[in-house]
Image (cartoon, rainbow, N blue to C red):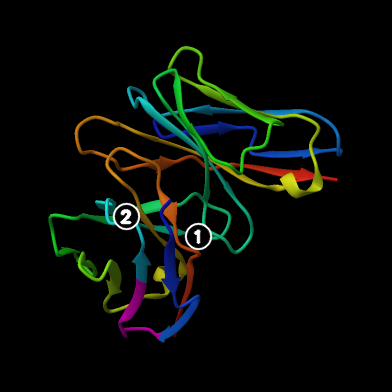
Amino acid sequence: GENVEQHPSTLSVQEGDSAVIKCTYSDSASNYFPWYKQELGKRPQLIIDIRSNVGEKKDQRIAVTLNKTAKHFSLHITETQPEDSAVYFCAASRPLNKLTFGTGTQLKVEL
Amino acid sequence: DTGVSQDPRHKITKRGQNVTFRCDPISEHNRLYWYRQTLGQGPEFLTYFQNEAQLEKSRLLSDRFSAERPKGSFSTLEIQRTEQGDSAMYLCASSPGGGDNTEAFFGQGTRLTVV
């Protein structure tokens, strides 16, 4: 089955700096790669996703890149703000299939 | 609120008791997923439904766990003879399931504590 690895497990940045979180996946049939943000005690919320026919996608301060050959994808957050502090999860899935999640990255944006 | 809703939000039970959780997906979403999340970990897949059909069950799901979605709308997850290791957040998610659209939207979860 699919195996998703995520790094780093914790990330601390200064407000205004960029943050990058990286994930690798094992199943070459996976074609959908979402990123979720989870604040303490709350539900995971989808923030951005990318499909395997696209190499990069951007939404305001958030971007995701995908390298299918290397089987890795990354989340980039620019101009970080304190409200970006949360746990971020990457995930991968085959078409219309279950999501396999990474272990999460605790992002802390310091003033 | 038209999102995924779960009930109850919290459940404390004694070891050995049975518990049942309910999930109401977003209207017209035909795919429904159950995940379990423990502290510091990502959600782990348990099972999912396409309408009323249960299409896959994780090997994590022991015989004490059963899930149903009888009319293809809400779903229930039952845990029999609970153990302390069952303590976790149980998350439900739904997705439209049609075409290539696989965005999954999560509910708030049911936090289970087995004492």
In the image, the segment drawn in magenta is A14-22
Q: CA distance from mark 1 to mark 2?
A: 17 Å
Q: Residue A95: x percent and y percent?
A: 27, 41
| Amino acid at circle 2 | Pro
User: Circle 2 — which element?
Assistant: strand
Residue shown at the point (43%, 59%) measured from the top left: A3
Q: What residue is shown with label 2?
A: A34
Instruction: Note whether residue B11 is visible.
Output: yes
Residue A81 drawn at (x, y percent) = 36, 75
Is B1 magenta? The answer is no
Q: Residue at x 80, y 42 (%)?
A: B83
Instruction: Identify whether A81 is placed above or below A86.
Output: below
Above/below status of B57 relative to B67: below
Q: Answer left or right for B113 relative to B24.
A: right
Q: Chain of mark 1?
A: A
Estimate the x, y position of residue A83 in percent, counting from the top left: 41, 69
Check disc 1 and give the amino acid type: Glu
Q: Which residue is more in the foreground, A11 or A97?
A: A97
Mark 2 falls within which chain?
A
Residue B26 appearing in the image: no
In the image shown, does A72 or B71 lie closer to the viewer?
Answer: A72
Residue at 49% x, 49% y: name it: A43
Label 1 element class: loop
Residue A32 drawn above or below residue A65: above
Residue A39: numbered disc: 1
Residue A19 in the magenta stretch? The answer is yes
Task: Give the mark nearest the N terminus, 1 or 2.
Answer: 2
Tell me where residue A34 sits by quadrant: bottom left
Q: Residue furthest top?
A: B71
Q: Nearer the viewer, residue B80 or A45?
A: B80
Which residue is located at x 35 percent, y 40 percent? Answer: A97
Q: Residues within 10 Å of mark 2 (few under 14, many from 20)?
A: many
